Image (spheres, rainbow, N blue to C red):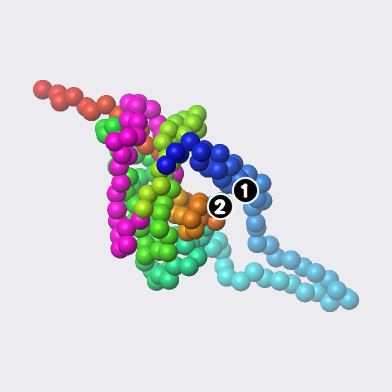
Amino acid sequence: MNWYYLRLPISLFALTLSLDIAITPGLVAQTLTTETNNSKVTFEPPGEGAPSITVGAGTRSEKYCPGDEVAKEQPGFMAVMERYTETREERPRFWVNIPQTVAKNVFFSLSDASQDYYYQMKISLPSEPGVYSFRLPADAPVIETNKEYVWFLGLMCDQDLTPDDYTLGGVIKRVEPHSVLN
């Protein structure tokens, strides 16, 4: 499959997601007082203090596809590695938790600091849930030493990646192995 033709859809997806994050105003719970016919009505938001569970703008609150039937206490689609990772490998390994899902694939993208796509691929998901790893394949270019790359992984709930699909991301950097001191 020629990934060159996917550059435009992925770029548009990233632009749409960026605009959604930049344009969406923050929401703040407030106590509203309304006067109607000389009577005073006060609305008090339920609960006390800040919400216990929050998510960043531009992401979905669930780590599953809409059609998935999973127990909410089970871990969803998530990275099982630090958001910023250093490696010595030319073709690094990425670790993720895959839930029981209706999705058949994930989309992986690796770009450099100037946001030029370095490598992209679609990965078939295993039938069983669990922690899995994948490595850049032999036909992928090796990542350069002392250079940071941004990785992106999207759970493809339908045939194509859509803005509603849950995504993960992080930064990976290849470093020189330390020499052994005598």
Label 2: which secondary element: loop
Q: Amino acid at mark 1?
A: Asp
Label 1: which secondary element: helix
Left or right, 47 with respect to 182, comes to: right
Residue occupying the point 77% across, 68% down = 33
Magenta residues: mostly which secondary structure? loop
Whether residue 75 appears in this view of the structure is: no
Question: Is 30 in front, or is 107?
Answer: 107
* Mark 1 lies on residue: 20
Residue occupying the point 35% across, 56% down = 125
Looking at the figure, which quarter contains the N terminus? Answer: top left
Span shown in magenta: 125-152
* Label 2 crowd bin: few (<14), some (14–19), many (20+), radius 10 Å: some
Would you say the residues marked 1 and 2 are in contact, meaning their CB atoms lie under 8 Å apart?
A: yes
Looking at the figure, which quarter contains the C terminus? Answer: top left
Question: Is 87 in front, or is 120?
Answer: 120
Left or right, 118 with respect to 51, comes to: left
Q: Where's residue 9, x and y in %?
A: 55, 43
Q: Where's residue 84, x and y in %?
A: 38, 40
- Residue at far front of view: 1
* Mark 2 lies on residue: 163
Residue occupying the point 44% across, 54% down = 155
Q: Where's residue 10, x and y in %?
A: 53, 42
